[in-house]
């Protein structure tokens, strides 16, 4: 598939910016970056499903699943987190299951559900960050 040179350059700059953000982020900030990228992937997947762009849908839902599984879930310490950690683990597992269903069924509604379910967690995480900086 052909990608115009301008798009390749733009993607390279975005990657450099993301790498810079990751290198300079606190542990709290890293989770915030995961949440931001998750939101971007889910919104992008919704658009891809609506446009019937299967390749983009597959890429974005797969990336969202990896962000949840390899990023958010793997960073949980259920022993130290107690009930909250266990609840987050169950929430993340539920979202992974629903994303697999969305992938198979081309379902905007399911992707929107995952976004809606995750939104309070993402908002809460951002609020914690604001309090920590205050």
Image: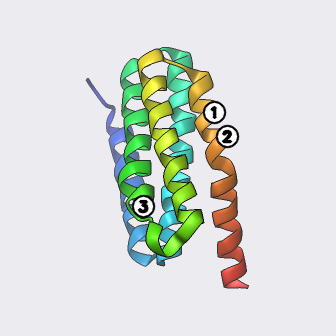
Q: Are marks 2 and 3 in contact (CB under 8 Å)?
A: no
Q: Residue furthest bottom?
A: 134
Identify the residue under disc 3.
18
Q: Name above or below for residue 122 compared with residue 98.
A: below
61 sits to left or right of 129: left
Q: Residue at x 57, y 46 (%)?
A: 39
- Determine the image quadrant of residue 8: top left
- Which badge, 3 or 1, is on the more N-terminal residue? 3
Q: Secondary structure at mark 2?
A: helix
- From this view, report whether residue 37 is shown above or below residue 94: below
Q: Position of residue 29 (x, y in %)?
A: 52, 71
The circle drawn on residue 116 is 2
Q: What is the C-alpha distance between the residues marked 3 and 1?
A: 27 Å
Image quadrant containing the C terminus: bottom right
User: Which residue is rendered at x = 69% and y = 62% of the image?
Assistant: 124
Q: Position of residue 51 (x, y in %)?
A: 53, 17
CB-based contact (under 8 Å), mark 2 and mark 1: yes
Query: In what element is the residue under mark 1?
Result: helix
Camera-near label (2 vs 3) is 2
């Amino acid at each position: 598939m052909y990608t115009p040179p301008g798009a390749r350059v733009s993607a390279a700059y975005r990657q450099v910016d993301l790498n810079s953000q990751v290198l300079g982020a606190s542990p709290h900030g890293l989770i915030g970056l995961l949440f931001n990228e998750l939101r971007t992937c889910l919104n992008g997947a919704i658009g891809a499903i609506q446009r019937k762009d299967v390749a983009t849908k597959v890429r974005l839902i797969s990336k969202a699943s990896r962000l949840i599984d390899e990023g958010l879930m793997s960073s949980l310490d259920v022993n130290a987190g107690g009930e909250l950690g266990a609840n987050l683990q169950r929430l993340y597992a539920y979202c992974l299951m629903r994303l697999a269903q969305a992938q198979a069924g081309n379902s905007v509604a399911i992707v929107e559900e995952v976004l809606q379910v995750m939104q309070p967690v993402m908002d809460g995480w951002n609020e914690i960050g604001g309090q920590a900086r205050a």
